Image (cartoon, rainbow, N blue to C red):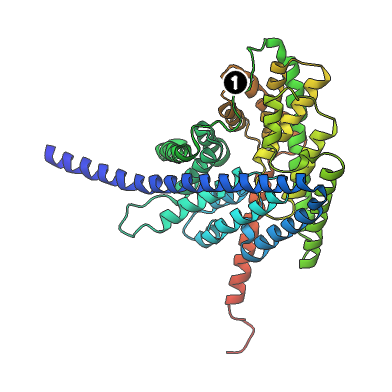
Amino acid sequence: MNWLKAIIQKKKLKTSILQAMPFWIASLITGLIAVIYTKLFEWAEELGRHCYHLHGWLIFIVTPVAFLLAWSLVKQVAIYAKGSGIPQVMAAIELTSGKEDQQVKQLLNLRMLLVKIGSSLLMVFGGGAIGREGPTIQIAGTVFRKINEWLPASWPKISSRNMILTGAAAGLAAAFNTPLGGIVFAVEELAKTHFSQFKTAVFTAVIIAGLTAQAFLGPYLYLGFPVISNAPAVMILAVAPVAILSGLGGSAMGLIILKVLYWKEKLRDYYSEMLFVLICALLLCSMAYFMNDGILGSGKSEMSTLLFTSNKRLDWQVPLLRICGPVLSFTTGASGGIFAPSLSAGATIGAYIAGLFDFSASDTNLLILSGMVAFLTGVTRSPFTSAILVLEMTDRHNVIFFLMLSGIISSLVSLLISKHSMYEYLKVQYISKLHRQDSKATNRAQPDASAPD
């Protein structure tokens, strides 16, 4: 009987290795794509800023043209490449079953992947207040789904749902260089079943994708090491108001985006949508030219300036502009994420509050990080993901309790604005739209029962 047990164990080991290999390969590919995408995104953003600083009036040409091209690319080639990509991944995870595989393919496919990258690069070149993190998650989900699809029939079966979910976690880890954030994101935002079923796959995927990105970009921190001394417990009295304002701001921004998108659905005419995109672009570049150019781009440079220079005082309109930027960019229907813009909006709220009360540089940095966590929580309703992301981006473990407190406070006050996150509403919208498309296709395929034979 011992020899029989040995054979069974050997078969189980072989099966486990074969099942793990697709995760490893997909993670490696995800890491490589994330590196290339990061470099292209940074170059596009820098090139756009260079054009603006060379001749300020160029923004009135560059931004409208870039926005229109980015929107048209999505509209004409891959409609589900629009937005951040996280709601599409959430919808794909919910739809993964044999009957709905065609619907998942519409959300996660190679054409969408290319359009996602191209459209978001055009947007950020034009000054769009977008990030690359959400798109990286949808791209990674696509890579993992395709690898699973390409497996031969003789290969041990792997759950499509687990592959997509693991891909999303690996994508976030590679985009931010935050492995713990990727894991917590998979558990808090995406997983609806027992995490123990696929925890090993998530861990290995996050590690491989992260290490691949680090091999080319170095063991970088997304933001760096801001100076924050050991804050006294009394700082809770300052952190709490920042968390409340940022949480309300994040959830309000998400609600405004949803309201605009729902209204925009009524614009059935192609040229009406084009006019809307053009108006958004002109509003954005006008605010940048006449008020403050901090509205442009992902906001990463603004976060770095606030955290690592003595220039920590802001005018009152800057936080409002950092909220208006994503609204004007996201609602166009082009590709672009909202993680980085949300973090930058929260950072400006924290800095503004700190400036009102003349806090020290160290305490200001604490309020900036707290605002980042709270604002992102207001958008995503994922307090622990937000706290872990900011913690890993800055390596400031001495303030982890303040960051977690900010996330919890934000998640509670956000309920005053909306019960669910923007992602949840968009996920439901995508699923409903796919079901309607399938119903129409089925009705067209069925013969008319009233017609004679």
Question: How many labels were placed on the picture?
Answer: 1
Identify whether 439 is placed above or below 312: below
What residue is shown at x 82% (from left), y 39% (from top)?
292
Which of 209 and 405 lies nearest the eye of the viewer?
A: 209
Kindly identify the amino acid type of the residue bearing the numbered disc 1: Ile
Q: Position of residue 385 (x, y in %)?
A: 58, 32
Along the horizontal axis of the image, is 321 left or right of 19? Answer: right
Q: Residues within 10 Å of mark 1 (few under 14, many from 20)?
A: some
What residue is shown at x 84% (from left), y 30% (from top)?
315
What residue is shown at x 30% (from left), y 58% (from top)?
154
Write down the residue under mark 1: 400
Which of 150 and 314 lies nearest the eye of the viewer?
A: 314
Task: Check the picture and name the quadrant holding the C terminus.
Answer: bottom right
Which residue lies most toward the right here?
A: 290
Along the horizontal axis of the image, is 157 left or right of 299? Answer: left
Q: Quadrant of residue 3?
A: top left
